[in-house]
């Protein structure tokens, strides 16, 4: 064929074929995806602080160890309320004509997925302490400390955000440890990660490949089917702040060991704090507790398991609560009719 002997025709045909393939394999699918995946109704664009925090997230290499995608496999249930969909990323628009906005979905989980961390852990105090020294809140953590995002001052000025670091992690520092603007921006970005419920009528993706519980044999009972593991639920929902030993962190998170609230025969206050959060100890230097039960969509059975674990661990001798009494209070709190 003459085309093979004419370099102009050969290279021209190659260029035309490349452009055609690019349009059909990349450009047209991208336009279709963009037109059919609008942001979810309740989603909001990132604020200026959150945008700056995203830049710090990229600069510090956080994407190397953290993903931002909840996969549709059962093992990812702990990271979000549902598998991620394209609409979750629809607000990631181009920075300008020349630059595309980075989609930081990641591919490795040396650390936990962050797609719903704003709901799982909405406490600014926890995030700042975790950034300063991860071992102060998670003893087994292998995450590096980002202490350069903080500064030490002899005196805290109005507007300064002081981080209450436990003595064993201060390394001889006697002044006030204050979060810099960059630390606050990074935390603002992390707290913006909140999975939203899908609009009515839009099918919710399913988690696949879950383990099926085998029914107990006639005449027997299965502990797996009748009781939930309170220690495991406590570890995944409460331990990062109140610690495995229930002693909390001095000046940061109050202890549950020996707590009058936990030991109270009436579980109403304990349940209300779990479901609605608590800010009554801010004057003592403790941060605001988020509504863990609501944020993590805990069911009454799970809450009972957690409460009984707290009431009977670390030397606590509180009365165990029953599902019947907690379910009644749970429904009252959810409906806003709980008695004062």
Image: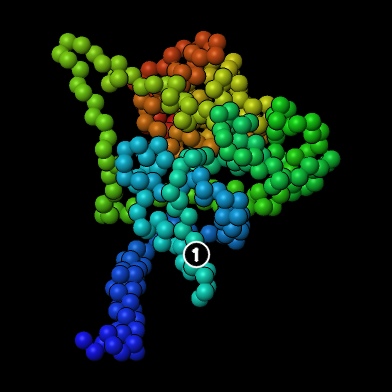
Left or right of residue 203, residue 15 in this image: right
Return the x and y of residue 210 as percentages of the image width and height.
27, 35
Q: For the residue carrying disc 1, how many other residues have a C-alpha within 10 Å: few (<14), some (14-19), or many (20+)?
A: few
Instruction: Name the outermost residue toward the front.
Output: 5
Q: Evaluate whether residue 233 shows in this view.
A: yes
Residue 58, quarter of picture: bottom right
Which residue matches tag 1? 101
Return the x and y of residue 286 as percentages of the image width and height.
65, 32
How is the model colour-coded? Answer: rainbow
Task: Residue at 78%, 47% (x, y): give it.
Answer: 158
Of the pair 286 and 146, the residue shown nearer to us: 146
Tally of numbered tags: 1
Return the x and y of residue 178 as percentages of the image width and height.
74, 43
Return the x and y of residue 288 as percentages of the image width and height.
60, 37
At numbered mark 1, what does the secondary structure look like: helix, strand or loop?
loop
Instruction: Name the outermost residue toward the left.
Output: 218
Instruction: Name the outermost residue toward the right.
Output: 154
Task: Residue at 23%, 29% (x, y): give it.
Answer: 212
The answer to whether residue 301 is above or below residue 3 is above
Q: Quadrant of the N terminus?
A: bottom left
Task: Residue at 28%, 54% (x, y): give it.
Answer: 202
Q: Evaluate whether residue 115 shows in this view.
A: no
Of the pair 321 and 121, the residue shown nearer to us: 121
The answer to whether residue 319 is above or below residue 37 is above
Of the pair 135 and 224, the residue shown nearer to us: 135
The answer to whether residue 285 is above or below residue 182 is above
The answer to whether residue 327 is above or below residue 131 is above
């Amino acid at each position: 064929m003459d085309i093979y002997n004419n370099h102009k025709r050969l290279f021209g045909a190659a260029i035309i074929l490349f452009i055609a393939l690019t349009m059909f394999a990349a450009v047209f699918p991208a336009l279709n995806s963009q037109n059919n995946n609008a942001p979810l109704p309740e989603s909001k664009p990132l604020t200026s602080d959150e945008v700056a925090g995203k830049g710090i997230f990229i600069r510090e290499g956080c994407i190397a160890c953290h993903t931002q995608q909840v996969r549709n496999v059962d093992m990812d249930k702990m990271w979000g309320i549902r598998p991620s969909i394209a609409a979750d990323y629809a607000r990631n628009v181009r920075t300008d004509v020349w630059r595309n906005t980075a989609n930081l979905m990641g591919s490795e989980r040396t650390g936990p997925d962050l797609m719903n961390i704003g709901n799982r852990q909405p406490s600014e105090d926890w995030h700042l302490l975790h950034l300063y020294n991860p071992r102060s809140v998670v003893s087994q953590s292998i995450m590096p400390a980002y202490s350069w995002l903080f500064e030490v001052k002899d005196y805290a000025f109005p507007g300064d955000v002081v981080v209450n670091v436990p003595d064993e992690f201060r390394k001889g520092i006697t002044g006030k440890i204050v979060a810099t603007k960059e630390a606050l921006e990074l935390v603002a970005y992390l707290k913006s990660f909140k999975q939203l419920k899908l609009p009515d009528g839009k099918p919710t993706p399913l988690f696949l490949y879950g383990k099926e519980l085998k029914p107990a044999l006639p005449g027997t009972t299965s502990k797996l089917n009748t009781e939930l593991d309170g220690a495991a639920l406590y570890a995944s929902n409460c331990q990062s702040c109140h610690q495995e030993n229930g002693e909390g962190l001095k000046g940061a998170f109050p202890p549950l060991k020996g707590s009058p609230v936990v030991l109270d025969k009436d579980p109403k206050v304990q349940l209300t704090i779990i479901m609605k959060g608590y800010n009554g100890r801010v004057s003592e230097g403790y941060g605001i507790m988020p509504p863990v039960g609501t944020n993590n969509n805990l069911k009454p059975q799970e809450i009972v398991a957690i409460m009984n674990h707290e009431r009977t661990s670390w030397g606590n001798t509180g009365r165990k609560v029953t599902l019947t009494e907690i379910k009644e209070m749970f429904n009252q709190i959810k409906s806003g009719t709980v008695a004062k």
